[in-house]
Amino acid sequence: MLSRTADHLFWMARYTERAENTARMLDVNYQTSLMPQSAEVAEQGWWAMLDISELTHVYDQKYGLLHRDDVIDFMVRDMTNPSSIMSCLRAARENARAVRGSLTTEVWETINTTWLDVQRMIADGELRQDPSRFFEWVKFRSHLARGVQFGTMLKDDAFHFMRLGTFLERADNTARILDVKFQASGRDDNDTDDPNREQNDFYHWAAVLRSVSGFEVYRKIYRTVITPQRVAELLILRPDMPRSLVASMEEVVAILALVANQQSAETGRQAGKLHADLKYARIDDIFGVGLHAYLTSFLERISDLGNGISRDFLVPLAA
C-alpha cells in the first residue's frame, strides 16, 4: 500500500477515535461538575483536562479566566483548536475523502454524514441544550464508524491501518482520561486504604468508569465498592477490558505484525516491549512509583511509538 494512502486511513481512524475520547473526557468532567463540590475543586477538574490535553496555554491565551462553558466550547466547536471535536470530525472526513476509493460506500457515507450532522447540531444549539446528549451522540457515531468498517471492509492493509490508528489513539486517550481524574481528585497515589475517602469518591469514580463504558464491567469483575486502585487496575492491566491500555496494546502489536515491512522491526520491538511491560505489571507496583508518573511515561512511549509508525509506514511527521 502507498504510504500516503496508509497515512490517510490511519489518521482518519485516529481522528474519529480522538473525537470520541474528547467527548468522553468532557462528559466525565461535565457530569462531575454537576455534583456537590467546591468551586475550587470543579475548576481544578477543568484545568486538569486542559493540561493533560496539552491545551492549557492555548486556552489561557484565548479566554483567560476559566469557565465551564468556555472550556466545552473550546473543546467541542473551536475550529482553531486542532483537538476539538469539530476539528477532529472534519479532519477524519477530509482524510476519508482523500482515499475515497479505498473505502466502502458505507464507511464513506458514515463519516461524511457525521460531519454534516455535527455542523447542523452545533448550529441548532444542541450542545448548549444538553451537553451530555451531544457527547453520547459523538460516541455513538464513532461506534458506528468502527462497526461499519468491521462489517464491510476487506481485511486487507487498508483495514489494518485503520485499526492501528484506532487502538494507538485509544491507548493514548485512556491513559489521559485516567490521569485527568487522578490529578483532579488531588489524591495521594499511595493513599489507597482510606475507606471513607473511597466512599466519598464513589460518584466521581463511577463517572470515570462510565466515561470509558466500564461501569457494568467493573461491577461484574470486582462486585464491590469502587476504589481508585481497582479503577486503575481495570483501565490499565485488564486484558478483557476493551479500552484498557494492555488490551489496546495487544491489538497494536498484532496489527504491526500483520503489516510489518523491512524497516519496521524496531517499531515492532518497542510495541512488544510496551505490551509486555503492561501484561506483566502489578497495580501495587504502579502505585508504588506513582500513577501520574507511570501514565506520563506511558504517554511518552506511545508518542515515540506513533513516531516510529509514521517513519516506517506513513508520511513522516514534520520535525
Image (cartoon, grey):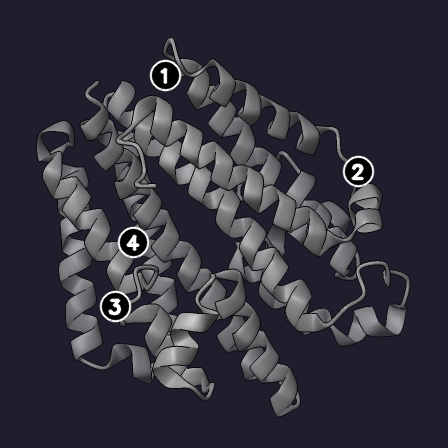
Q: Secondary structure at mark 2?
A: loop
- Distance from disc 4 to disc 2, alpha carbons, whole Å, reads 35 Å
Question: Which mark is drawn over residue 282?
Answer: 2
Amino acid at circle 4 = Arg
In the rendered image of this protein, does residue 22 appear above or below residue 170?
below
Q: Is residue 147 left or right of residue 226?
A: left
Dots 4, 1 in contact, CB < 8 A: no
Q: Which residue is mark 1?
A: 259
Query: Which numbered mark, 4 or 1, is in the foreground of this view?
Result: 1
- Distance from disc 4 to disc 3, alpha carbons, whole Å, reads 23 Å
Mark 3 neighbour class, 10 Å CA radius: few under 14, some 14 to 19, many 20 or more: few
Query: Which numbered mark, 4 or 3, is in the foreground of this view?
Result: 3
Marked residue nearer the N-terminal end (4 or 1): 4
Q: Which residue is mark 3?
A: 80
Image coords of residue 300 (percent x, y): 56, 43
Marked residue nearer the N-terminal end (1 or 2): 1
State the residue at coordinates (23%, 24%).
3
- Distance from disc 3 to disc 2, alpha carbons, whole Å, reads 41 Å
Dots 1, 2 in contact, CB < 8 A: no
Image coords of residue 148 (percent x, y): 26, 38
Q: Is residue 173 left or right of residue 101?
A: right
Mark 4 neighbour class, 10 Å CA radius: few under 14, some 14 to 19, many 20 or more: some
Image coords of residue 45 (percent x, y): 58, 75
State the residue at coordinates (38%, 79%).
61
The answer, for residue 46, to whether it is visible in the render is yes
- Distance from disc 4 to disc 1, alpha carbons, whole Å, reads 27 Å
Q: Which residue is mark 4?
A: 141
